[in-house]
Image (cartoon, coloured by chain):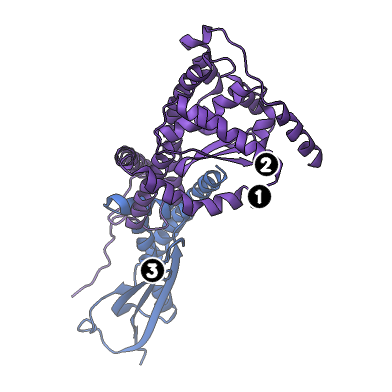
Amino acid sequence: MIDLIIFLSLLTLGYIFGRLAENRHFKSIIQREEDLREILTFSERLPSPGLGPVETTLVDGNVVISIDYFKRFAAGLRSLIGGRVNAYETLLERARREAILRMKAKAKTAGAKQIINVKLETSSITKGKKQQVGCVEVYAYGTALIPSTQ
Amino acid sequence: MKYKNPKIPEGINVSKEHPLKDFFAMLIGVIAAILIVIVILSFIAEYMVRFIPFEVEQALAERFQQSTASQFNQVSNPSNRHQQIEQYLQQLANQLAKAQSLPEDMPITIHYIETEEVNALATLGGHIMIFRGLLEKMPNENALAMVIAHEIAHIHNRDPIVAMGRGVTVSIALLAIMGAGDGAVSQQLINQVGLLTSLNFSRQHEEEADALAIQTLDRHYGHIKSADTIFKIFMEQENSLNPPAFLSTHPLNERRIKKVTQHPSSKKAGTNKPLPSWMSDLLQPLNLQN
């Protein structure tokens, strides 16, 4: 019985705080994406033609985000029956956008207008260990093109 | 060529559906599926396990015997007093087994255990444990016979092996489900669901055992006086601060008392057979020791 009470309170706490954090994060992501809108990102390996002289530098951004207890449980249930794992979809969406935003922020400080050759790496930190809340790292990196002042 | 940064609409990768709605739909579905699987498996196990011969059950019980004995700190070198009580209980059990027409190849072995617990239980291989706490509370032989007859009825109905077979089957199934999922998934949840159903099943067995025990008493003594004493004792215990642990697996005591008083044989006249006079002498000094 005690186990059940502990479990239910963990679930409730996980839900409340997880949802608060997620909503706040999404709001902040949307706001900052708007702020960094003028920096263009390309997956192309080469700069677009007619860009003029540029200096290049590596820019990167990485983020680690964890899911909460509630989402882990929901995802566990989902793994029994199959289908869209909503719990993990928001996790990865947040991680990807946040990593790109951090990379863009670095590019902005360097004075860049474009980032080319942008790549994303995703890795699970918990590596599927049992009884652990899963967390994910997303690493975004690319080449920032800074217009040459010469 | 002019490049633009288009604004991507929200909610492509993230569904707008409220997470709780999704969650409860899944939860209810999974619990229902688990319950159905458990119920089906229990029925199959209960049916199949009766085909296990009693000798196999006895051999199985021998392996558990050692651990059970130490669990109830059974004395390995019993005193005369202990042996005398155990012998008396064994004789009574043999008479009751005969009255219940228990097959000859299902011998009953009584173990008298000197702890305060007000309890008696039947386990695999025809072993019955009677605790001193229960014996002390018995006003006469008829009440004690009801308890022993109830436990013999469990063995007669092969309830211990059925319960074990069901328990093993259900836990293997639950492990398999957990293995299929995340592993960390819903472990607590699954445990809780498993417990509730196993409780429900043993209640039915208790009622069957009660009915058979009343019948046995009627056959042995010619009346069923004092058959409800044990339930009254349990009811008292329940009302006191320290209810016996196994109580929750038993049907409500009031219902059980009613079953006894409504039994057609309850109108038969008869007197209670007292417990042997040496019994109270043997139980008394022990109380002082503790």
Foreground pick, B206 / B96:
B96
Q: Which of marks 1 and 3 is in front?
A: 1
Which secondary structure lies at badge 1?
loop
In the picture of the structure, the residue carrying the numbered disc 2 is B82
Chain B's shade in the image? purple
> Could you tell me residue B270's position as x and y percent?
58, 10
Q: How far, Cα to Cα, is label 2 from label 1? A: 9 Å
Amino acid type at image mark 3: Leu
Q: How far, Cα to Cα, is label 3 from label 2? A: 87 Å
Q: Quadrant of the C terminus of chain A?
A: bottom left
Q: Residue at x 61, y 26 (%)?
A: B234
Which secondary structure lies at badge 3?
loop
**Is label 2 in contact with label 1 (beta carbons under 8 Å)?**
yes
Q: How far, Cα to Cα, is label 1 from label 3? A: 80 Å
In the picture of the structure, the residue carrying the numbered disc 3 is A36
- Is B216 placed above or below B158 here? above
- The chain displayed blue equals A
Amino acid type at image mark 1: Val
The verdict on a common chain for dots 1 and 3 is no
Task: Give the farthest residue toward the right.
Answer: B288
Chain under numbered label 2: B
Q: Which residue is drawn at 55% across and 49% down?
A: B68
Chain under numbered label 1: B
**Is label 1 in contact with label 3 (beta carbons under 8 Å)?**
no
Which secondary structure lies at badge 2?
helix
> Could you tell me residue B106's position as x and y percent?
42, 38
- Is B31 placed above or below B252 here? below
Q: Residue A51 carries which label?
A: none
Q: Nearer the viewer, mark 3 or mark 2?
A: 2
Callout 2: few (<14), some (14-19), or many (20+) C-alpha neighbours within 10 Å? some
Left or right position of A62 against B267 = left
